[in-house]
Image (tube, coloured by chain):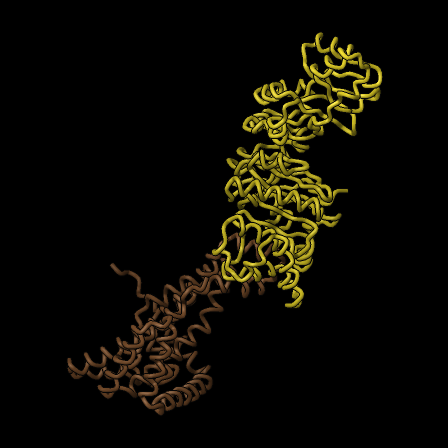
Amino acid sequence: MGKIKIEHVTKVFGKNTSAALKLVEQRVEKTAILEKTGATVGVYDANLEIEEGEIFVIMGLSGSGKSTLIRLLNRLINPTSGSIYIDGQDVTKLSKKQLQEVRRKKMSMVFQNFGLFPHKTILQNTEYGLEVRNISKEERQMKAEKALQNAGLLPYKDQYPSQLSGGMQQRVGLARALANDPEILLMDEAFSALDPLIRKEMQDELLELQANVQKTIVFITHDLNEALRIGDRIAIMKDGQIMQVGTGEEILTNPANEYVRNFLEDVDRSKVLTAEHAMVRPKTINIENDGPKVALQRMKEDAVSVLLVVDRHRNFKGYITADDALEISKRGYKDINTILKTDMPVVEPTMLIQDILPIISDSPTPVAVVLDGRLKGVLIRGVIIEALASSTQEVNEHE
Amino acid sequence: MNNFSPIPIDDYVETAMGWLTDTFSGLFKAVQNNGEDLMNGLTSLLTAIPPFVFILVVAVLAFVATGKKFGLAIFSILGLLLVYNQELWEELMQTFTLVLFSSLIAIIIGIPLGILMSKNNWVEEMVKPILDFMQTMPGFVYLIPAVAFFGIGVVPGVFASVIFALPPTVRFTNLGIRQVPKELVEAADSYGSTANQKLFKVELPLAKSTIMAGINQTVLLSLSMVVIASMIGAPGLGREVLSALQRAQVGNGFVAGLCLVIFAIIVDRLTQSFNKKKY
């Protein structure tokens, strides 16, 4: 069972909730329900399972119900029907006191506009979650200072939020959440209010943080690139319904419906294409069997000036150039080990094209794609650019 | 036109008042006596302070409260010296007592009521029309039950002032708490705050400046009741204004009125200066 499990959760805003709920059960559409009952369906029969330790991104445009959904998890909004299990415990059935405990210990929230208390200093803000738990002043100060230290904000601890930039404020928001040492982090459009460069920085920091602390993170965003960048899995929402759940890769290559497909159109393709998509079959030579004559023959056949060198298990060894092969062949040497070059950049098949681009533009040679020592393919500059320009269908064909 | 005899609302009210007066006469009497003693005591205490010391204290307070500016301090010195010069010092102290008591009582009742209103829509719906009633009913009308309950003197004056001056504190407290940004309320909730923690750590501090604006209004309104309350025997500058009115003494009326204005300005600026944002 997952860390968080959402079963048939519906949230109806407005007065006529029971009538609206019946219509939801009959699978009547959201707009029709609004017309008939005057009630707005915020979340429409949502089912989800979120695993421990993953970054789960819920993505949708405004009005899709994603912010409502995340607030149902800590019951800032109470669901109209359905169950929400956290570690197997149904939070919809908790008493006020139990809910407070869950909020204090299990999960912390990070807000779009940071949610920092303007009348409290950075340190006091960071302490807040500990303060409401009645933890002693020394202990909470120590924990809060440690959290600020990790965020690199300790020198600002006596300032007020308004004295800090947006990016710094959100770091405080995150530090406040982490000071509590929760198992679950709820991040509601946490980076949306930041400008793009700071935003990317924060995404990187979150990923780095996740590598160290392994929280279960539920992240809300309207930005697909952000979702693809940080999400282990992504749920796409529309009109309160969850349209598709899967890894970024799954959703991109296999959109569940027209809506998801349209949604994906504006993705910056370089951010989701990996080395695997863009690599081509390499021209190789076997270091154990072949000599320079074979190499030259093969280069002539394929009209290339470089051959990748492998052993009989296709373990990647390096490359040889036509000039060198010609040289030793003239001298009558047989062993291509003497001309083997090993300075070819190597990447993994899952590496993102956007990260490969700087490598390949700096390298005079193509880039080898290697998994566990085995040569999988080769990346050639022209092919990458072509892949970037191609459509989704063509990306699929590369698979 | 009037085929129906008038509904005897006046009779109803009088019956109700009579019942209240009879039933709680012991309580009213106790409040009257103790209140009178308490306020007279405070007034004697204030008059016992040498005026120059008092003026100096006010000036220093004004200097500090306005952030080390001289304007209000100088105004206080000159203004209060003028009051002293016009031999209205004791009256000023009586007025001060009246305003202090009625404002304090209004704040003690008003802030909790405002909090209750902000937390409960039903309470808000109920209390709002009552506040409207309290504010629009002419201040003179409150004098009648005040006299019925407490006789004449300073206590009924305070009673009438409290009713008249209460609404702003209630309204502004309600407004201030309701205006706390939703995200901050959510932040407080999401970290597992209890209702009290949320109120005292987040909502009240953030509503503080709005509440202070309400308190400022309450103080000024109770000041404006001073003259009206003098009609039922409340002592102070108001009584001077009233007697000048009754004898058509323009000069005396102006002087007493001017002293009231000076006092009002000092009180207003002082209460406002406590409301400076630090963040």
- Which of A309 and B75 lies nearest the eye of the viewer? A309
Q: What is the quadrant of the N terminus of chain B in the image?
A: bottom left
- Residue B11 drawn above or below residue A277: below
Report x, y in % for residue A378.
69, 21
Report x, y in % for residue B105.
43, 76
Q: Residue at x 43, y 65 (%)?
A: B211
- Residue B211 drawn above or below residue B232: above
Position of A164 with respect to A154 (left or right) is left
- Which of A241 and A390 lies nearest the eye of the viewer? A390
Position of B215 with respect to A62 (left or right) is left
| Colour given to chain A in the rendered image | yellow
- Which of A216 and B278 lies nearest the eye of the viewer? B278
Quarter of the rendering containing residue A29: top right
Chain drawn in brown:
B
Quarter of the rendering containing residue B215: bottom left
Q: Residue at x 59, y 37 (%)?
A: A226
Report x, y in % for residue B236.
29, 84
**Residue B233 visible at all:** no
Position of A226 with respect to B153 (left or right) is right
**Residue A29 visible at all:** yes
- Which of A333 and B14 lies nearest the eye of the viewer? A333
Report x, y in % for residue A26.
63, 33
- Residue B51 drawn above or below residue B112: below
